[in-house]
Amino acid sequence: MTSAAQHTPTPTATSTSADPADEHEDLSLPELKTARYFHFQEQVATASWATMARRMPSLLRHAIVLAWQSSPRDVLATTTFNIGVGAATAWALVATTSVLDQLFSTVPTPDRVMAALPALVWLAAALVTRGACSALAGRAQARLEPQVVVTAEERFMGDATHVELAAFDDSDFHDHLFRCYLRGCDEGGALVRHATDVLTGLVSVVAAAGVLTALHPVLVPLLLLTMVPQWWGSAAASRLRYRTMLAITQGRRRKHLVERLMIDRTTAAEVRSYTMADRLTSAFSKLARHELAVHMRLATRMVTIRLAGDTASGLVMGLVFVVLGWLLVQEIVPIATAGAAVVAIQVARGALSRALSSVAQVYESGLYFSDYLNFRQEARTRLPGQDLAPAPAGFDQILVENATFTYPQSAGEDEEGTQRRAALQGVSVTLRRGQTVALVGENGSGKTTLAKLLSGLYTPQQGTVCWDGTDLAGVDGDSLRSKIAVIAQDHTHWPLTARSNVTMSSPRDTGRLERAAQAAGADTVIATMPAGWDTLLDKQFAHGYEPSGGQWQRLAAARGFYRGDDGTEVPLLIADEPTAALDARAEHRFFSSLHAHAHRTGSAVVLITHRLASVRMADLIIVLDQGRVVGQGTHEELMAMGDQTPYRELWNLQANAYRPSDLTDTT
Ligand SMILES: Nc1ncnc2c1ncn2[C@@H]1O[C@H](COP(=O)(O)OP(=O)(O)OP(=O)(O)O)[C@@H](O)[C@H]1O
């Protein structure tokens, strides 16, 4: 069969241009990348029946295991009732044979009808049973599919939130994760549905074949003969419909893109300012009409296939009748058996048609479901160990020894590239409880990476991070991180209430909340919010509120203070660029709070900032450059090291901006 994908032109930017004289007509959008959720398109479009048949057993095995783990009861019900449908089909066919036997006997007509009555009741009972089994199978199937999806989603989400953080820096992992998220889990449910449809169809075909064998073995080849055009017609129609849909996908995505430009709030103003409405409408119409034309062509080709299929079917059925007639004349089969054979053949043809139209869908769903299976397999290699020791209650000192950390290699990057990209190389530092330690250095020097090593989010590939004698590599990550408060540089704008944005997973404590808000300067932000602490911080919700950048930063700082407001349990507070969006007054207040926090709780505070005036008071300043420690000490010690040292250079650059040009630093 010729692929529709080959014949149906994919609408592109150039194909949308109607009038070359109109230079504004074409929106000139470049080719779209293959969507993550459609990456198996090529494989699906070109798969042969043999390929599908080869993959089927393993796909079905995985789907059955997942279905069984989701709901054994509904799997048993689906299977039992579908077998019931097959058995009732066979029963109905046998009853039909009895009815026909009686009706074609040689006694007078009223007697024949009376004699057929018990068989008719039997037939009615079989049909009712078949209907009931079919309905119950449908119910079990409808229950099973969403359960399979939820089980798959729960496992996926569990893995996604528990894998080590470094996995999110690996573009390959990220890609697998997103593909699984977009389709993998849902397709597990769809696979079960389509597989059950195939099963249902096959059970009925087998039932009809069984009855025919019992009636007379010579009838079975007749059944197989009628199935050939049926197979061809159903398979050709379903593949054509399918490939056409695949072929128009690109155009449909392009259409959605244009649609979004036309109806999105963010583009609405410029659509009007730059009078884009007509151009967009024209582009939209062309894409929509192209799709329409493809559908029209599909309808015509479907009719052609149907006509060819029906003609072939009619011819074969004619042949079957000729053979049946010959069998009757030769008295090989009685007339009642021949009648029952015709009914059985019709039942088998209908069931086969349904099964076939589901086979291609089993294949496609199976491919996408393999994204789910692959993701889970990969995630297992990235989950933390199970039997790790709990984190120590605290520390007197944190010792980072010779730590080297490289972010995961990007696809296509060579070993040399990896060497060049080491974010930290041989870093050794010591932090003591109660100290305020500042990490300074230029952009990309490794400050945030070191902070993430200290906060237990990353583990160095070489070297160690120890709390007193305990190497954090052997410690349970969750128990460690519950003892560390982090004010992150790229903090999350949680779509939750202001209160939950600060308390997060810790228990609620009003006193602690107020203290944290005050320390971070978030109290004045809360005071301006319509519902105070109960204000929802997301405009997507009714009465939602959108804080400004600086207000979000104060809330993030309050989150860190809240987590850290427990001297015995949280011995480390890490603040990464906590004041970048704050005004001068808020910044001053924040640094005072930070020192007060360290003093009051006795915890170690790690501060990352580019504002060197704020680190002057730190007990220890660690200077990083290209992933290496290039200086450490107090402000005075570092300034005394000489003119060309990185810290002094940076200090002078910033200090000079506030001085008359003829002044230099005074140390
Ligand atoms: N997730 C990541 N994946 C790959 N490389 C990263 C990632 N995060 C940081 N890097 C690289 O690691 C190096 C150190 O980055 P890091 O964020 O630790 O620097 P920084 O000193 O905190 O910078 P800044 O002052 O700009 O915040 C940089 O070269 C950066 O490109």
Image (cartoon, helix red, strand yellow):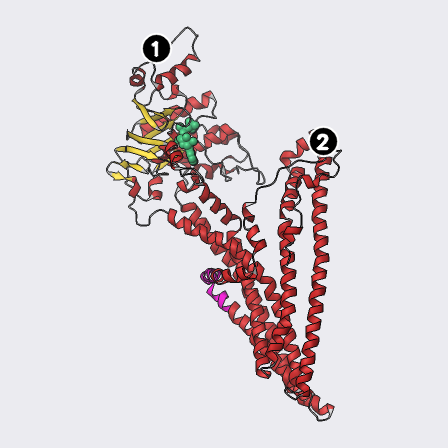
Give residue 240's position: percent from left, percent from top.
65, 57
Q: Is residue 211 above or below residue 573?
A: below
Say which residue label 1 marks.
666
Q: For residue 209: magenta?
A: no
Between 635 and 583, which is closer to the camera in this rendering? 635
Q: Is residue 357 above or below residue 619?
A: below
Report, in whole angstroms, how far the alpha carbon at label 2 lies from the one at label 1: 60 Å
Query: Which range is magenta?
Result: 61-77
Q: Quadrant of the C terminus?
A: top left
- Circle 2/circle 1 CB separation < 8 Å: no
Left or right: where does residue 308 sit relative to residue 136?
right
Amino acid type at mark 2: Thr
Helix, strand or loop at mark 1: loop
Tag on residue 116?
A: none
Residue 519 picture quarter: top left
Residue 490 picture quarter: top left
Q: Is mark 1 within 8 Å of ligand 1?
A: no
Say which residue label 2 marks.
275
Helix, strand or loop at mark 2: loop
Give residue 16's position: percent from left, percent from top.
70, 40
